[in-house]
Image (spheres, rainbow, N blue to C red):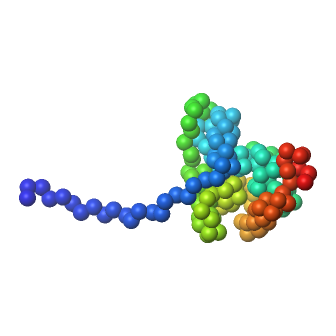
Amino acid sequence: MLFKRPKLNIPPPRPPDLPFDDAARDALGAATEQAQRVHASAIHAEHLLLALLQDPGGIPSRAITRLGFGLDDIRLRIEHAAPPRPWGVRAPVLPYADDAKGAIEFAMRETRAAGLMVVGTGQLLLGVLQSPQGVPKRALAFLDITPVALRAAILAESRAAASGDAPDPANGGLS
């Protein structure tokens, strides 16, 4: 044999990524819009959190409200805590920054740990809170919003939505 091939050390395949439900996909799209609105060059965890809190009838918004915090207060805290980003290019597709990628990975871990097969907005919110690099973790930790408390609030809101006790956003939040 003239040339000897080196043995490749190929890692085992990782489990396939979980699919996102419609609301989570909408939140990822809204995060892109949030990043483009502030002329960021990438989608960061704070953009994802702001996108998750856009829908007042969504599980993330109701879970934060259940913990006793106003959505506008959280939005203002995140917007003020986010570092100024250099003037980015207006691109139709922005890459995800490391903190947003970490948040999505944590969301998938939360989904697997809960025994679910689809990543929802509640798991994305938990992922954003647990991503160690992101602005949201620091801002929400300042308010003493912990993953344990948030997980319990998300579970309660998910159960309320499944049983039909959730407020109807089309009816102004009244059931």
Whether residue 133 appears in this view of the structure is: no
Residue 31's quadrant in the figure? top right
Q: How many discs mark residues in the rendered view?
A: 0
**Residue sitting at x 62%, y 65%:** 116
Residue 30's quadrant in the figure? top right
**Residue sitting at x 82%, y 59%:** 164
Q: In the rendered view, does 21 fall on the left or right side of 7?
A: right
Please tell me which residue lies in front, 11 or 84.
Answer: 11
Residue farthest to the front, as pictured: 164
Residue farthest to the top, as pictured: 90
| Quarter the C terminus occupies | bottom right
Residue 8 is situated, as x and y percent measured from the top left of the image, at 27, 61
Whether residue 53 appears in this view of the structure is: yes
Residue farthest to the right, as pictured: 174
Please tell me which residue lies in front, 82 or 154.
Answer: 154
Residue 125 is situated, as x and y percent measured from the top left of the image, at 70, 56
Query: On screen, 94 above or below 130?
Result: above
Please tell me which residue lies in front, 11 or 29.
Answer: 29
Residue 129 is situated, as x and y percent measured from the top left of the image, at 69, 59
**Residue sitting at x 75%, y 66%:** 155
**Residue sitting at x 81%, y 50%:** 57
Q: In the rendered view, does 3 fall on the left or right side of 123?
A: left
Residue 35 is situated, as x and y percent measured from the top left of the image, at 65, 39
| Quarter the N terminus occupies | bottom left
